[in-house]
Amino acid sequence: AGPVGAITATAPVTDGETVELTPAELSAIRQIADEIKQETTQNDGPAPGVSAFSAKGEAGKKFIELLKKSPGLFKSAVSKAKEGRDAFNKWMGKQNVAVRGAWWLLSGGVQTWVFDELVKMVQG
């Protein structure tokens, strides 16, 4: 059993892949997840002078920032990226609802960019 107030995934997981988040980590992650949601749903198009790709790229950068709010989550994400896209997506499906929600708000192209950046970190 974890400390009182520890936040875990909503579904019981027995494989040890779900990263437990402290209340402070969860709060920071939720804030960034909300920012991603606002950026991805705010407008029909990017702001004047901003390409659609750069607007989406900002959401990808925010997602990596979200992962870094929990050192355990970030380390696990990089490790799963090393194992490949299928392993990463399976792992992602077992994380806290705020993390999963932010991930699924990203378009496929932005998810690919985030995954590629995590793989670069493994190789770096």
Image (spheres, rainbow, N blue to C red):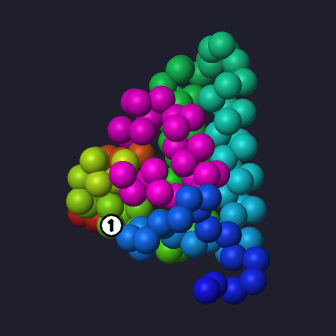
Relative vertical location of residue 100 with respect to residue 18 in this rendering, above or below: above
Determine if residue 73 is in view: no
Residue 109 locus on image (x, y percent):
40, 30
Left or right of 42: which side holds 120? left
Q: Which residue is at 67% across, 69% downward?
A: 7
Relative vertical location of residue 32 with respect to residue 35 in this rendering, above or below: below
Residue 24 locus on image (x, y percent):
74, 71
- The quadrant in which residue 30 appears is bottom right
Along the line of sight, which residue is nearer the eye, 59 or 96? 96
Q: Which secondary structure class fits the magenta region best?
A: helix
Q: Which residue is at 36% across, 52% downward?
A: 90
Residue type highlighted by circle 1: Ser
Q: Which residue is at 53% across, 73% downward?
A: 71
Residue 46 locus on image (x, y percent):
63, 19
Relative vertical location of residue 73 with respect to residue 117 in this rendering, above or below: below
Left or right of 31: which side holds 64? left
Would you name the residue on which mark 1 appears? 79
Marker count (numbered): 1
Q: Residues within 10 Å of mark 1 (few under 14, many from 20)?
A: some
Left or right of 123: which side holds 108? right
Residue 18 locus on image (x, y percent):
48, 67
Quadrant location of the C terminus in the rendered image = bottom left
Q: Which residue is at 66% across, 47% downward?
A: 33
Quadrant location of the N terminus in the rendered image = bottom right
Which element type, helix, strand or loop, lies under badge 1?
helix
What is the span of residues highlighted in magenta in the rendered image? 90-113
On whether residue 95 falls in the magenta region, the answer is yes
On whether residue 98 falls in the magenta region, the answer is yes
Left or right of 123: which side holds 2? right
Along the line of sight, which residue is nearer the eye, 42 or 90? 90
